[in-house]
Amino acid sequence: MASDHTRSAILAAAERLYADRGFGDVTLRDIVAEAGVNLAAVNYHFGSKDELIAELFVTRSIATNRERLRELKAAEEEGGGRAPIEVILRALVGPTLRGCLGPENQRSTAARFMIRASIESVPPIRRIKNREIDHLRKFAGAMRRSLPDRSDVDIYWGLNFALAMAHHTIRESERLTKLSEGKCDLDDVEDVVARVVSVATMALTAGRTEAKAASKVAAR
Amino acid sequence: MASDHTRSAILAAAERLYADRGFGDVTLRDIVAEAGVNLAAVNYHFGSKDELIAELFVTRSIATNRERLRELKAAEEEGGGRAPIEVILRALVGPTLRGCLGPENQRSTAARFMIRASIESVPPIRRIKNREIDHLRKFAGAMRRSLPDRSDVDIYWGLNFALAMAHHTIRESERLTKLSEGKCDLDDVEDVVARVVSVATMALTAGRTEAKAASKVAAR
DNA sequence: TTGCAATTCAAACAGTTGTATGAAACTATC
DNA sequence: GATAGTTTCATACAACTGTTTGAATTGCAA
């Protein structure tokens, strides 16, 4: 299939530009200029702009998902089919957080691209994200095996909250740094992971009824 | 000042269209068609498209923030300057959740607009959101008064996680419903509020050191 | 009614966007 | 080294965008 040089130059340039400036104001002309190729090359190699974006996103999220499942599988095998809930949650949020946080200067283009994809939401990426449900179901299954006494509803809410904390922290990392005047150190990724996992674990293991009741009383 | 009819017709039409179809593919021509006014009216009354969007968003978020502060102030006065952490958190996430969730058929255009604004992220709205930090600081202050033994870092992380759970649940409410096959009832807003408040409270009150240590052990 | 300002309108503008075209330049195979 | 297939290129295209313009219309005060 020839040199492929143009193709990968486009991919690299697009990822860099999207990561830096967002999807909103990066045009095909910006990309081909950065890549040093002709304007028509994008449509020739990828079909359309949307397919280029989709290919970028699919590549990166497949990598993340593979890493997640690898950690999950390892944990379940070690525990004979049942992994501790902390380890499952860590497998769920760890790869994403590690990929997207950390000192800015050592943050990869791929990571910055994924942050963008998480902040801005463009149609081709949204379509792909919708297919992620099957992947999450695997985690829900592992969590149910780990906490067999827990109701499905609680499992799903715990999963939801774990993802919420991870993604929101990534999306709003800048604001949290500013709000806390630098006291919250987003570069210490392992501390962030530990915090998210810790809270999500509490959410899943604490006596739900009491907590809920207490909270409802407070509402009065 | 005149009739103001055109102005408010534009506002209503824009809110409706943005709520339904998102910012991405609603043009000024769509808006004026829906409002039944001339194309130039938007620029005449608002200056530019971005200022129209900004006015919509500012109006709505001022209303939400006022409601939040009202609840917070009432709680602190009742407690003689110190409100229980649950009540503070409820004042923080309650208005937003109540505004954006609930049965779809009784969900206001305003609420659906704010969901959009939370999912998609367009420049004029992003600029305004950045000014929200002062507002959050007031909550951080109340939380510090409520939990004087807690470190600032923990306070900010708790605040971050509370907002994370609320916003993510709004943003991904559709996906959570699908993932849980309807088992998680997003229409029961008070249950959602209770869950978020409950988990956030645990995050803020649980013995951080132990939880963190346990979580770090699990990482090995 | 007259006059003046505020508002509405149709039309055009200027810019940008992603995509398509067809010729030119390559590359590898025979 | 001719040929067929792939890849590049300059250029044009068609559509759509937000915004501006200047004339027409309206509403209101004198």
Image (cartoon, coloured by chain):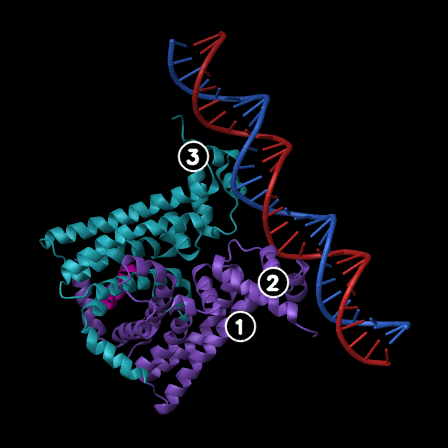
Chain colours: A cyan, B purple, C blue, D red
Tell me the chain of label 1.
Answer: B
Location of residue A54 in the rendering, given as x and y in whole percent from the top left corner: 40, 44
**Discs 1, 2 touching: Cβ within 8 Å:** no
Do the residues marked 3 and 1 share a common chain? no
Tell me the chain of label 2.
Answer: B
Residue type at numbered disc 1: Thr
Q: Secondary structure at mark 3?
A: helix
User: Split into 4 quadrants, where in the image is the C terminus of chain A?
Assistant: bottom left
Circle 1 sits on which residue?
A: B59
- Relative to A78, is B183 above or below? below
Q: Residues within 10 Å of mark 3 (few under 14, many from 20)?
A: some
Q: Does residue B191 appear to the left or right of B103 in the view shown?
A: left
- Relative to A212, is B165 above or below? above
Circle 2 sits on which residue?
A: B35
- Relative to B16, is D30 above or below? below
Circle 3 sits on which residue?
A: A7
Tell me the chain of label 3.
Answer: A
Residue at far left of view: A80
Residue type at numbered disc 3: Arg
Q: Secondary structure at mark 2?
A: helix
- Magenta residues (range): A188-200
**Nearer mark to the viewer, of 1 and 2:** 2
Q: Earlier in the sequence, mark 1 or mark 2?
A: 2
**Nearer mark to the viewer, of 3 and 1:** 1
User: Residue B154: in sight, yes or no?
Assistant: no
